[in-house]
Image: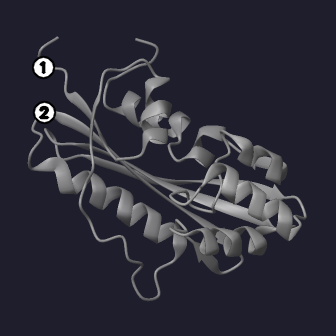
Amino acid sequence: MTDTPALLLASSSPFRRQLLDKLGLEFIHQSPDIDESRLEGESPVALVMRLARKKAEALAGDHPNTLIIGSDQVAVIGDQVLGKPGSREKAIEQLSAASGQRVTFLTGLCLLNTVTGRTQVACDPFHVQFRTLRPAQIERYVDAEQPLNCAGSFKSEGLGIVLFKAMEGRDPNTLVGLPLILLTEFLAAEGISLPL
């Protein structure tokens, strides 16, 4: 159908692309250029919802007749927000802090319809109980997987699963960065019922 909106993933993450592939929908992807800094006094939930929306909105002007998916994730231990570590040292520091702790991963999701201007935004939490990790284990893990571009410094879809004692949440895809159950609900509200 020619009037069916295109689907755009506003992300450079190969992990999010792999997750979206699971739904069997044709889509394109593009990286939005936004400032991801946390605002003063902003809660982690408000942060991921704002950034998911900003990612979608950043590409809206160039993509008429499109459903744009924006997503953002942070890890939280108590009041401490963990983003992407960016370096080996920071990854080791993050995993050391997570050792033996319950860590909450907050993933903001936005679906923006550029035809109607309708925006759906929500936050999907996922909880991970980390094993008690020895420093040598953490270093071996970081050197093996190089999780420097992953919130919380691990890849649950790979070797990172050995760091966990238990997981709790609605959708395991949320932990990787794209809550597919919630996205399916957003798409249904736009008239796209899956499976097609």
Give the mark nearest the N terminus, 1 or 2. 1
Q: Which mark is residue 23?
A: none
Image point (72%, 77%), residue name: 78
Amino acid bearing label 2: Asn
Pointers 1 and 2 in contact (CB under 8 A)? yes
Residue 40 image point, x, y percent: 42, 88
Residue bearing mark 2: 65
* Residue 133 relative to residue 151: left or right: right
Quadrant containing the C terminus in the rendered view: top left
* Residue 8 relative to residue 122: left or right: left
Secondary structure state at the residue bearing disc 2: loop
* The quarter of the displayed image where residue 92 is located: bottom right
Amino acid bearing label 1: Asp
Residue 17 image point, x, y percent: 42, 35
Image point (63%, 61%), residue name: 153
Q: Is residue 184 visible?
A: no
